[in-house]
Amino acid sequence: MDSVTIVGAGVVGYASAAALRAHGYTGRITVVGGERHRPYDRPPLRHGFLTGQTTIGELALESPTEDLDVQWQLGVAAVGLDPATHRVTLANGRTVDADAVVIATGSAARRLGNSPRGVHTLRTVDDALALREELLPGGRMVVVGSGVVGLEVASTARDLGMDVTVIGSTTDALCTAFGRTVADAVHRLHARTGTHVRTDLRVAELIGPGWVSGVRLTTGEEIGADVVLLDIGSVPLVGWLGDSGLDLRGGVVCDEVGATGAPGVVAVGDCAAWLDPVTGQHRRVEHWSDTRNRPGIAMAALLGDPLGGSQRPSRLASQQAGSRVQFAGRFHGGEDLSIEAGGVETGDLLAVYRRGGRPVAVLGIDQPALVKDWQARLVGADASGPGAAAAPRADAATLAVPQA
Ligand SMILES: Cc1cc2nc3c(=O)[nH]c(=O)nc-3n(C[C@H](O)[C@H](O)[C@H](O)COP(=O)(O)OP(=O)(O)OC[C@H]3O[C@@H](n4cnc5c(N)ncnc54)[C@H](O)[C@@H]3O)c2cc1C
């Protein structure tokens, strides 16, 4: 194999290039990226970058001394793939040919019907630049959706002196992934700092036209806003693969090492629905921290490297209304939740998730010592392997998450 095209210059595209080099691949690597930026860290977009504490330069994933010898084609999207010839067609009409293709196009934030001005989603550095212009003291912000990103932006806006209302529903990621008890505890943290947290509601529409003036709930109630952030989930960016013949049900469908049905074509990251060997289902895992596992595994598979790699627990850390929320582990669905310390009333808690009686994940609110302790006891916590070691710089990106 002499040439590889990686489509998507996000953390996974970058970690895939690093993993190829770490596996000893010396051929040509071309990375095609729809954004104009070199790969950067997304978690700080929720807080440090919005407040101006983190600069755009500090988001960079590449270290100044690193040279992966990659040909970058940035600011141009791929619009087609021929899986048989591995030819990628770009929006500017050019084509890139290679012996193999890595699909790493990530996901896009879901939107809600019409979009008057003042309505934002937060996915890219350009989204964050546009949003931060409008986070003005005394302004009114509505956050639709109470996921980790929406809630952290809510607390950032509150810190900046805004009047903030969060509209949560039972289908929000915080509730569905971590459970109602944990969601309630996090909501309470925000309520204590003056954020209006309204749960079990749905937004029917954004009130426009022109500049947004608020949101209308399905109950008919209207809530005024100068700025609205939508945090209502994401969709895999696979539209450009529409004519490829690849299985695109719920993302690029892959086996447990990222291989698609087409030889020499793998998919990794938010856009990829890998086979979960525990449940036998294909599903997308939208975790930055998975970048330290999966590119290494997929690149090993692409190179026919028998060493492969192994999956390690995902991690997440977020500042929520002055409290530190940490998660480690891996969900497959249907885990049992128990609160092992603290509780909803005290504000700090430790939740342990078990599958078949064995701990698979842990979430702590202001419980760093207990999280660290439990992290070592999780199923798979001791898993390590050549695949994990194959993306050293991506590991550094993961370690940066707790500071986000
Ligand atoms: C604000 C924010 C905070 C987050 N915080 C955390 C956190 O604390 N912990 C955690 O685990 N996860 C977090 N996540 C999720 C994490 O960032 C994602 O799981 C991760 O970015 C996925 O990486 P990726 O490379 O698959 O996709 P992306 O990072 O989305 O990168 C994909 C890239 O591909 C490009 N692209 C798309 N289509 C095309 C095309 N047709 N042609 C060329 N290029 C294309 C996109 O423009 C993008 O640059 C956060 C996400 C956001 C948005």
Image: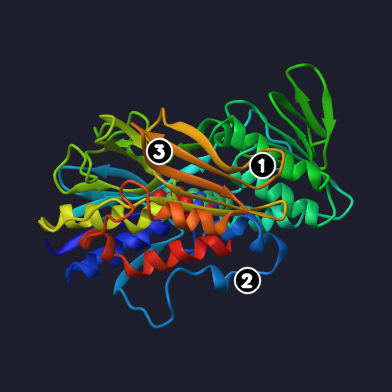
Question: Circle 3 sits on which residue?
Answer: 331
Q: What amino acid type is highlighted by mark number 1?
A: Val
* Comes first in the chain, label 3 or label 2: 2
Q: Secondary structure at mark 3?
A: loop
- Quick check: 99 above or below 173? below
- Hey, which quadrant is residue 354 in on the image? top left
Quarter of the image where the C terminus is located: bottom right
Question: Circle 2 sits on which residue?
Answer: 55
Whether the residues at callouts 3 and 2 have beta carbons within 8 Å, the answer is no
Q: Give how far across and how far down residue 302 sits, in percent.
A: 17, 53
> As rendered, which of 343 and 230 lies closer to the eye?
343
For label 3, the crowd category at 10 Å Cα-Cα, with few meaning under 14, some 14 to 19 and many 20 or more, is some
Q: Secondary structure at mark 2?
A: loop
* Comes first in the chain, label 3 or label 1: 1
- Quick check: 369 above or below 219? below
Mark nearest the camera among 3 and 2 is 3
Question: Circle 1 sits on which residue?
Answer: 186
Is the CB of the residue bearing disc 3 within 8 angstroms of ligand 1?
no
Residue at image point 60% right, 57% down: 45
- Hey, which quadrant is residue 335 in on the image? top left
